[in-house]
Amino acid sequence: MGGSKHLRSYEVPTFWPISLKERHWAIKPGPGPHPIERAIPLGMLIRDVMKLASTGREVRKVLSKGLVKVDGRIRRDYRFPIGIMDVIEIVPAKKYYRIVPDEKDFMKPIEIEEGESKVKPLRIENKTTIRGGVIQLNLFDGSNILVPKESQLPFTGQISTFSTILVKVPEMEIIDYLPLAEGAYVVVMGGKNVGTRGRIAEIRKGARKSSSLVTIKKDDSSLVQTSLNYVYVVGKDTPVIKL
């Protein structure tokens, strides 16, 4: 039978900006690059967060005309799941936004320049070697990139999980590699320290790599600790994107 096609408002993640008293039903995210617990439907983002439409009907009309792009590609499905680091383009207004972790709202769209909208940092969730010695990188947004064995990229042999690659969108061409290491600039994308940013002071290895404990030195020199699973590298010394 599969899962339900409907979603009641009391079942949604707590960071969704809807009122239980105003709406009984919520837009259920469709299948896509982000799981429901860390995503928001495109229609709700446009209507309830960015306030670019008043009703669901208006949202569907805007999307049907191809006026909204996600990571450089036109998206017409109002249920398309939007997650951290996704880039939203409002075509007629030539406005660009990136979804970043936020201490208060969990996920927040911030306006960015057109040039920055062409790049996207993607964390490497895991990597595998397939036939022909080709390395397949499975990335945070559900996409994957194939890196041939004979690739001329200078960092091919250094690529590791939980590090980040900087890609050009929508071509998905690798521009740079941001390794997970002490001194790297990171942002926390989950847990009680969500939205925290700073440089890695220490990585204490756990039983599994994902359970390692990371100490982050914030910009104000205070220290916080969080699980490596929540850490997203966004720069070597300073962030390569606007936060």
Image (cartoon, rainbow, N blue to C red):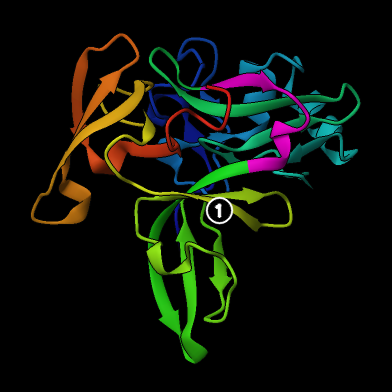
Q: Is residue 165 above or below residue 58?
A: below
- Residue drawn at x 60%, y 38% as measured from the top left: 86
Q: Magenta segment range? A: 108-119
Q: Is residue 20 above or below residue 79?
A: above
- Residue drawn at x 51%, y 16% as measured from the top left: 17
Q: Is residue 33 above or below residue 192?
A: below
Q: Is residue 11 magenta?
A: no
Q: Is residue 118 magenta?
A: yes
> Could you say which is closer to the camera, residue 12 or residue 185?
185
Q: Dot 1 surroundings within 10 Å: few (below 14), some, or many (20 or more)?
A: few
> Could you say which is closer to the camera, residue 96 or residue 52?
96
Q: Is residue 216 above or below residue 49?
A: below
Residue type indicated by callout 1? Pro
> Which residue in the protein does label 1 denote?
31
- Residue drawn at x 39%, y 63% as measured from the top left: 158
Compared across the picture, whether 76 is left or right of 111 comes to right
On the image, the x and y values in percent for residue 135 come to 47, 75
Compared across the picture, whether 167 is left or right of 163 comes to right
> Could you say which is closer to the camera, residue 78 or residue 182?
182
Residue 58 occupies which quadrant of the picture?
top right
